Amino acid sequence: MSSQDTPAVMAPAGGKTADKVFKGIAYACGILILVVLAAVFLFLFFRAWPLIGGDQAANSATISSFTGGKVSSFWGYVLPLLFGTVLISVLALLIAFFVSIGIALFISHYAPKKVATALSYVIDLLAAIPSVIYGLWGGLILVPAIYPFWNWVANHLGWFPLFAGPAANPQRTVATVAVVLAVMVLPIITSMSRDIFLQTPSLQQEAAYGLGATKWEMIKLAVLPFGKSGIVSASMLALGRALGETMAVLMILSPSVTGYSFKILQASQSNAIASNIAAQYPEADDLGVSVLIGTGLILFLITFVVNFVARKITEKASA
């Protein structure tokens, strides 16, 4: 067939126009996200600014009235809440991280195909369960059931400040809340890590086997390094979920807003920002709402910083 007989490759009709339209829509979606984020920040900032940077004497009177005289400054009110939020979230992440990685590796490299498929479905379903269901399960089932274990921990490991006793009964404590949040964030880390592990190049795995590596050595040399950035991203996403969790913490924890304590087995030692807002908002007046919005601004900034740091760590890990 001559070159003259070869049909010319025709560009799709309206191709350039469709490309411009799609590009415009993509740009608009990206800008919309920034606009929404900026709007939320500005709302929180302007509603909270009178308490953060306004007349300190008036602010002290407002906060003292809102807290019943327990605290007289905004930072004295929000910092214990921030401490409790970070403590609960970090403990939940520590509990969930290694279990999640183990489950992800089992699904991707050890389990038979049918078992791996079933476990994948279960993990995905766990991620879809509403947080209020976890709160009900934690408050009605886990709190009474876990007391003997935490009491044993307090009796045998109480020399360590984190497990100082006596263990509260019922166990409406930071330790129990951390376990519930760990169950909540476990599907996030597991599903993302599983997908990353399954994408490990087969040539790298076969090369490790060719050098005489066992399966665990192959995972250590090929799979885990390949998935390092994905694991970090999954962990930070789970941490962000734990930082902002409201209902599960509200339904389980016996709260305190006035101090800093690492005694996770004792009741009324800590509280979290999100659950405190949910508990106080219905009965708060206008000044009280401003105080709560100020704490929400701090949580917003902390979550933003966590995600920003996660992005930087991911970029460095994948470099």
Image: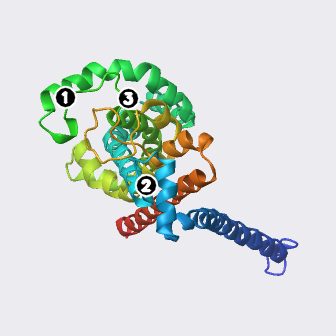
Helix, strand or loop at mark 1: helix
Residue, disc 3:
172
Q: What's under tag 2, amino acid-wise?
A: Val
Q: What's under tag 3, amino acid-wise?
A: Arg
Helix, strand or loop at mark 2: helix
Measure how far apart labels 3 and 2 are at the Cα level.
22 Å
Residue, disc 1:
154
Q: What's under tag 1, amino acid-wise?
A: Ala
Quadrant in the picture for the C terminus: bottom left
**Image-based side of 63 in relation to 264, left or right:** right
Q: Is residue 203 above or below residue 171?
A: below
Q: Is residue 245 at least partly visible in the picture?
A: no
Quadrant in the picture for the N terminus: bottom right
Give the residue displayed 38% in from the left and 56% down from the top.
Answer: 76
Q: Earlier in the sequence, mark 3 or mark 2?
A: 2
Helix, strand or loop at mark 3: loop
Residue, disc 2:
78
Measure how far apart labels 3 and 1 are at the Cα level.
15 Å
Q: Earlier in the sequence, mark 1 or mark 2?
A: 2
Relative depth, front residue between 260 and 112 = 260
Find residue 218 and report its horizontal and vertical position in percent: 27, 49
Find residue 143 and report its horizontal and vertical position in percent: 38, 23
Q: Is residue 241 at least partly visible in the picture?
A: yes
Specify few, some or many for label 3: CA neighbours under 10 Å numbering under 14, 14-19, or 20 or more: many
**Image-based side of 36 in relation to 242, left or right:** right
